[in-house]
């Protein structure tokens, strides 16, 4: 019954742990990771089984409500999401204010934050019905917002959602389709994208999820908290890595495909060059998601075609790194982002959309964590610090400085 945190705080004792290498910020029953054994489970179910047998909608339900849905529950959940895919017409015009060359990530996070302004009847974190409504609205509207952020960047007209389609099919049509033109969804692409979204759906206390929890801990609403998570995800050390990987592969290809030379630069830390898509704070042997993504890259490029040379460079980099002392010593392995970009490009997505796809996948995880946070007495997140500045000094009048 002793609260160790409270006890230590009362003594003035502070733990210093930059980057939270060894600090658990919360208890959680959502996702289990064993970094040494390369295990990832959502609510106890192994990621390999979910990737193979489930769907993104079903996994979203599992993460948010804790159990796999019955057929009736899944039907109800899917239909509720279907009914909320439209964006408020005024919110559609919100996109007009952005420059066309804007990166879609800040457009996405701004539009998600703006949901707080357009849907004020679902903002109260303590009203379960409002929380449920904002949950469904986010799951339904994020793909629409994501597609519009792409359409805006290419100067093409927005498409209204077609609710006869599944969530992923609808997103593909709104992204790549044109008004008044039939759009045939490629089932291979839809299935592969669905699987990739499952792989990204949660990853316990990563940077963006911790951000969602921290923002939420001030009693901020779900839309605003998720918008904070999207911003955290954008950084190249986190979700932005999938864009950075493809840019790295493009650059190596443009420079003649010299993989050895690139690895040499990384090892010498020349200009701070890193092997993007490699390394993970928790996985120290392999990232189980990376294995599944690599298989998917082989299958999807085999089926729909794509830049084999990029895939080949990625494989050569992996091979070189896995046999190199620098990477072995530091226990650096491909993470989930290493092969996703090659697949997204083969699917037709521009590089700047990759992190948006990650955000679409991570959304149910963010929601699940925000709801878990609110299922217990709310405690505001407020880290301490080790002060390193001046001790007291006297103010000097402007004339005397
Ligand atoms: N390439 C080259 N060297 C690396 C890499 C890399 N990708 N990652 C880590 N290292 C080196 C570091 O330079 C450091 O070396 P040193 O001991 O000589 O100083 C050592 O390995 C330890 O790395 P840290 O950065 O201290 O590890 P940390 O756990 O803090 O960082 C991170 C993890 C951010 C993922 C890091 O590995 C990285 O920057 N990777 C590249 C970016 C990336 O792919 N991010 C996606 C992560 S997964 C995700 O968010 C979806």
Image: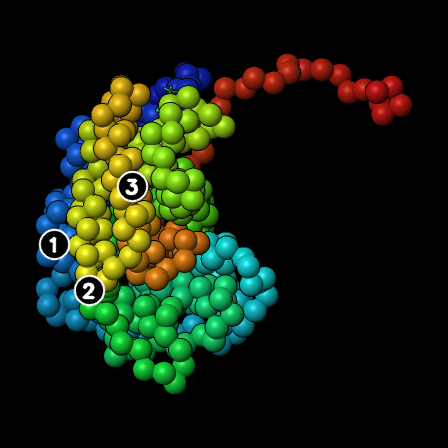
Q: Please give the name of the residue rendered at 31% of the width and 21% of the height, measured from the top-left corner.
A: 326
**Residue 75 position in % (x across, y down):** 17, 71
As drawn, is 209 to the left or to the right of 324?
right
The mark closer to the camera, 1 or 3, is 3
The mark closer to the camera, 3 or 2, is 3
Q: Please give the name of the residue rendered at 61% of the width and 18% of the height, measured from the top-left corner.
A: 389
When asked about the image quadrant of residue 141, the answer is bottom left
* Mark 1 burial class by Cα count in 10 Å: few <14, some 14-19, many 20+: few
* Real-space CA distance between mark 2 and mark 1, rounded to the nearest whole angstrom: 14 Å
Q: Quadrant of ligand 1?
A: top left
* Mark 3 burial class by Cα count in 10 Å: few <14, some 14-19, many 20+: many
Instruction: Compare marks 3 and 2 and give the one earlier in the sequence.
Output: 2
Instruction: Compare marks 1 and 3 and give the one earlier in the sequence.
Output: 1
Residue sitting at the far bottom: 180
The mark closer to the camera, 2 or 1, is 2
Residue sitting at the far right: 399
The answer to whether the residue bearing label 1 lies less than 8 angstroms from the nearest atom of ligand 1 is: no
> What residue does disc 3 label?
314
Q: Secondary structure at mark 3?
A: helix
> What residue does disc 2 label?
188
* Mark 2 burial class by Cα count in 10 Å: few <14, some 14-19, many 20+: some
> What residue does disc 1 label?
52
**Residue 14 position in % (x across, y down):** 42, 19
**Residue 356 position in % (x across, y down):** 39, 55
């Amino acid at each position: 019954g002793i609260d160790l945190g409270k006890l230590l705080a009362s003594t003035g004792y502070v733990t210093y742990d930059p980057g939270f290498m060894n600090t658990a910020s919360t208890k959680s029953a959502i996702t289990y990771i064993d970094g040494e054994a390369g295990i990832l489970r959502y609510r106890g179910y192994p990621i390999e089984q979910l990737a193979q047998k489930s769907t993104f909608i079903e996994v979203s339900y599992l993460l948010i409500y804790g159990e796999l849905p019955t057929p009736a529950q899944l039907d109800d959940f899917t239909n509720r999401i279907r009914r909320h895919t439209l964006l408020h017409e005024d919110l559609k015009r919100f996109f007009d204010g952005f420059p066309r060359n804007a990166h879609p990530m800040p457009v996405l996070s701004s539009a998600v934050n703006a949901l707080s302004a357009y849907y004020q009847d679902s903002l109260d974190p303590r009203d379960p019905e409002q929380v449920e409504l904002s949950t469904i609205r986010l799951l339904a509207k994020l793909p629409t917002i994501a597609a519009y952020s792409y359409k805006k960047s290419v100067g093409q007209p927005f498409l209204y959602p077609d609710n006869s389609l599944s969530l992923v099919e609808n997103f593909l049509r709104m992204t790549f389709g044109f008004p008044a033109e039939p759009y045939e969804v490629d089932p291979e692409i839809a299935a592969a994208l669905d699987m990739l979204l499952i792989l990204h759906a949660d990853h316990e206390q990563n940077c963006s999820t911790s951000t969602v929890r921290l923002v939420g801990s001030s009693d901020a609403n779900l839309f605003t908290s998720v918008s904070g998570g999207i911003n955290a995800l954008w950084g190249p050390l986190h979700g932005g890595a999938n864009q950075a990987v493809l840019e790295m592969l493009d650059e190596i290809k443009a420079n003649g495909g010299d993989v050895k030379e690139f690895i040499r630069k990384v090892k010498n830390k020349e200009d701070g060059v890193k092997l993007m898509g490699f390394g993970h704070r928790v996985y120290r042997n392999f990232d189980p998601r990376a294995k599944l993504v690599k298989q998917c890259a082989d299958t999807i490029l085999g089926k729909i075609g794509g830049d084999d040379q990029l895939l080949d460079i990625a494989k050569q980099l992996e091979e070189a790194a896995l046999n190199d002392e620098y990477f072995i010593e530091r226990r650096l392995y491909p993470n989930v982002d290493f092969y996703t970009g090659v697949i997204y490009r083969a699917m037709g997505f521009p590089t700047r959309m990759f992190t948006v796809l990650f955000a679409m996948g991570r959304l149910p995880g963010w929601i699940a964590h925000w709801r878990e946070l609110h299922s217990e007495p709310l405690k505001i997140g407020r880290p301490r610090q080790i002060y390193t500045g001046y001790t007291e000094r006297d103010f000097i009048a402007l004339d005397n400085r």
